[in-house]
Amino acid sequence: MSTITGDIINGGYRSQDGTYGVGDLVTRDGTDVHKVISLEPDGFAGEFVCVVEPALRGNEETPWITLGDTQYNLCRRYSLVEEPGTDGQADELKLQVLQARTEKLEYMKRAHEVTRWHHLMKQLDREYLETMFETAKPALIKMIAAVTDEQPKPQTARERVRALKAHPTSVRGRA
C-alpha cells in the first residue's frame, strides 16, 4: 500500500499506510476492537480506546486491555476491522460496540449516583451525630457517673456550690 502521511480526513489524520483514520474501528489480534481517537500528523502513532475486550489467551485470567481503556500505540500494530459481506459479523460487531457503550454509560451513571449518595449520607451522619451528642451529653455524663459510682463533676459555679452543700463532709472543696 502507498504511504499517506498528513492527509486530513474528517478532522484527523490517516495511519502511515493509509488504511484507517480517526473514528475507524481497528483490531490487534482479531478478537478485540478499538476506536481510533487521534493520530499523529505523520500517521506513525495514535491513541486508541478499547470498545470490545479481547478474548483470553492461554491461562490468562483477565484480558490485556479492558473496556474503555485508552492506549497510545504504534499504528502498525493495528489493522482495520474489515466489514464482511453477508456473514453478519459486521452487524454483530456493531451490536457489541453499542452494548459496550451502553454498559459503560450505565456503569458511569450508577457510579456517579453511588458517589453522590455516599457524600449525602456522610453529611447527614455527621450532622445527626453532632445533634444527638449535644442533646444526649448531659444524660451520658450522669450515666457514666452512675456506672463508675462517682458523682458527675459540677459544670457551673452554681452546680459546684450545690455539690458542696450536698456533701459537707467531703474533703474536696473545703478550705
Image (cartoon, rainbow, N blue to C red):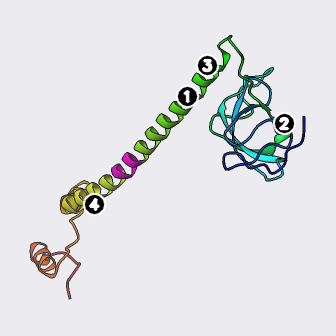
Farthest residue toward the top? 87
Disc 4 crowd rating (10 Å Cα; few below 14, some 14-19, many 20+) is few
Q: Is residue 29 above or below residue 125?
A: above
Q: Amino acid at mark 3?
A: Asp
Mark seen at residue 98: 1
Q: Does any portion of residue 145 appear in the rendered image? A: no
Give yes or no for contact between labels 3 and 1 (Cβ–Cβ under 8 Å).
no
Q: Nearer the viewer, residue 97 or 114?
A: 97
Cα–Cα span, label 3 and label 1: 10 Å
Q: Nearer the viewer, residue 121 or 136?
A: 121
Instruction: Specify which label sits upstream in the sequence, 2 or 4.
Output: 2
Q: Amino acid at mark 2?
A: Arg
What x and y, as percent, mark residue 25? 69, 33
Q: Secondary structure at mark 3?
A: helix
Give yes or no for contact between labels 1 and 4 (Cβ–Cβ under 8 Å).
no
Reading the image, the residue beneath label 4 is: 130
Decide whether the magenta segment is chiefly helix, strand or loop.
helix
Cα–Cα span, label 1 and label 4: 48 Å
What x and y, as percent, mark residue 117? 37, 46
Disc 2 crowd rating (10 Å Cα; few below 14, some 14-19, many 20+) is few
Reading the image, the residue beneath label 2 is: 77
Q: Which residues are magenta?
A: 116-121
Of circles 2 and 3, the one toward us is 3
Cα–Cα span, label 2 and label 3: 24 Å
